[in-house]
Amino acid sequence: MNVQQLREQLAELPGHWPVHVEVEKDGSGGGGDVDFHFALDVQPSSFPTYGSMAVIRIARPEDLG
């Protein structure tokens, strides 16, 4: 996914919804094996193996207040 594709998908969603990142816990299967994390922000970044990219940072519990 690139930034433009992300913008297009987000534009179709209600603006007041919080943004979460879905992460598999252990991969053993079933709906209970998924965690949802609040997105804190998105920042430009660069990695030697992948080049430039947008990186979504996940909020820690202390970031949520």
Image: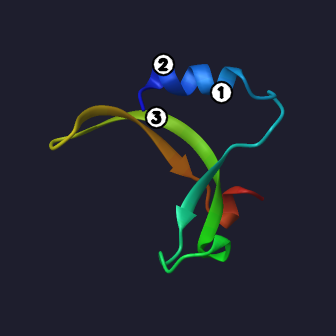
Q: Quadrant of residue 13?
A: top right
- The mark lying in front, picked from 1 and 3, is 1
Label 3 to label 2: alpha-carbon separation: 15 Å
Residue 39, image x, y percentages: 62, 47
Where disc 2 sits, the SS reads helix
Extreme-front residue of the structure: 30
Residue 16 vertical placement versus 56 (above, below): above
Q: Camera-side residue: 6 or 29?
A: 29
Q: Quadrant of residue 47?
A: top left
Marks 1,2: beta carbons within 8 A: no
- Which residue is tagged 1? 10
Q: Is residue 3 left or right of residue 30?
A: left
Q: Amino acid at mark 3?
A: Gln
Residue 59, image x, y percentages: 61, 55
Where disc 3 sits, the SS reads strand
Which numbered marker is on residue 4? 2
Q: Amino acid at mark 2?
A: Gln
Marks 1,3: beta carbons within 8 A: no
Which numbered marker is on residue 39? none
Residue 52, image x, y percentages: 28, 30
Q: Amino acid at mark 1?
A: Leu
Q: Camera-side residue: 36 or 56?
A: 36
Earlier residue among tags 3 and 2: 2
**Dot 1 crowding, Cα within 10 Å, few <14, some 14–19, many 20+:** few
**Dot 3 crowding, Cα within 10 Å, few <14, some 14–19, many 20+:** few
Extreme-left residue of the structure: 48
Q: Measuring 81% from the left and 28% from the top, which residue is drawn there?
A: 14
Q: Measuring 84% from the left and 33% from the top, which residue is drawn there?
A: 16
Q: Measuring 61% from the left and 46% from the top, which residue is drawn there?
A: 40
Which numbered marker is on residue 43? 3
Quadrant into which the N terminus falls: top left
